Amino acid sequence: MKPVRLFCLPYAGGSAVRVYHDWPAELPGHIELRPLELPGRGSRMSETPCPSVDGLVDDLVHCVLPAIDGPYALFGHSLGGLLAFELARRLEHAHHRPARHLLVSGYEAPDLPTEPDRDHLLPDDEFRKRLRELSGTPQEVLDNDDLMELLTPVLRADFTASNTYRLGSPWLRLSCPLTVFGGLDDPEAPPHTLRAWQHRSTGPFRLRLLPGNHFFLHTERTSLIEAVIDALGPAGEADAGRRRGRRA
């Protein structure tokens, strides 16, 4: 019986390996975590950051497709949630490899009529102030000019990707279950912006709200991991689902 391969995507500026480094210790044996590193960070530090969702998804497809040899799920937080959604759509509709489950965290529904952000265009000092407001970049990093010189191009590229994204082909919905996580006090993806995600899949939908702001991913890590485990179900469920599909 193959484990469920859980591909995880980071928030803007984050390294997937670092963001999810402590998840495997809390996951059961039937869930295998695979962090997806994006260009410009971690082991891919030497690569040029990509400022578009389409370009990032192109890159991710090449990384993920060869690694799909059984059931898989996708999880992403903030920008990572948007990338997980578009990656799931590409894998299902272009490559006929639907996910077992999509888990989106801390990102508002992509088809809401909202005014686009333009913070990727801010001058460096105002951009750094915006990062302080988000509370996702450590203070010691924000105060270190050398580190910020290295990190700012990655962050600008990620913010550009998120801010310039527009949902295309809205009729191409997923077929897998979709679970969305949100922070009760998240100003970036408030709870009222999350329920519309239900229109992005024909499968079962569930919204789960946790205490915390935009980075409840860290402050409520144990509760979030428990909810992810619950969403993916017990060992053996994936094989049972494939057997039911073959009989159908």
Image: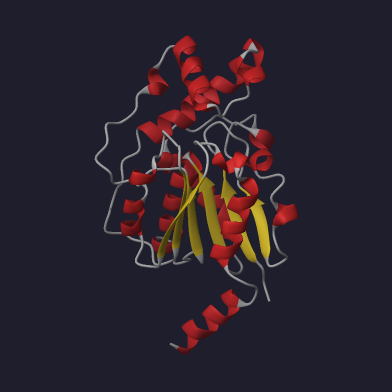
Q: Residue furthest right?
A: 25
User: Quick check: 246 above or below 192?
Assistant: below
Q: In the rendered image, is residue 10 in sight?
A: no
> Looking at the image, which residue is at 71% across and 63% down?
28
Q: Is residue 69 left or right of residue 74?
A: right
Q: Residue furthest left?
A: 113
Relative image position of residue 110 (x, y in whole percent): 34, 45
Which residue occupies the foreground of this view, 134 or 244? Answer: 134
Which residue occupies the foreground of this view, 195 or 103? Answer: 195
Q: In this view, does 165 lie to the left or right of 96?
A: left
> Looking at the image, which residue is at 63% across and 77% down?
236
Relative image position of residue 7 (x, y in whole percent): 59, 54
> Looking at the image, which residue is at 50% across and 55% down?
103
Quadrant in the picture for the C terminus: bottom left
> Looking at the image, which residue is at 66% across and 68% down?
3
Say how the picture is coloured.
secondary structure
Relative image position of residue 5 (x, y in whole percent): 62, 61
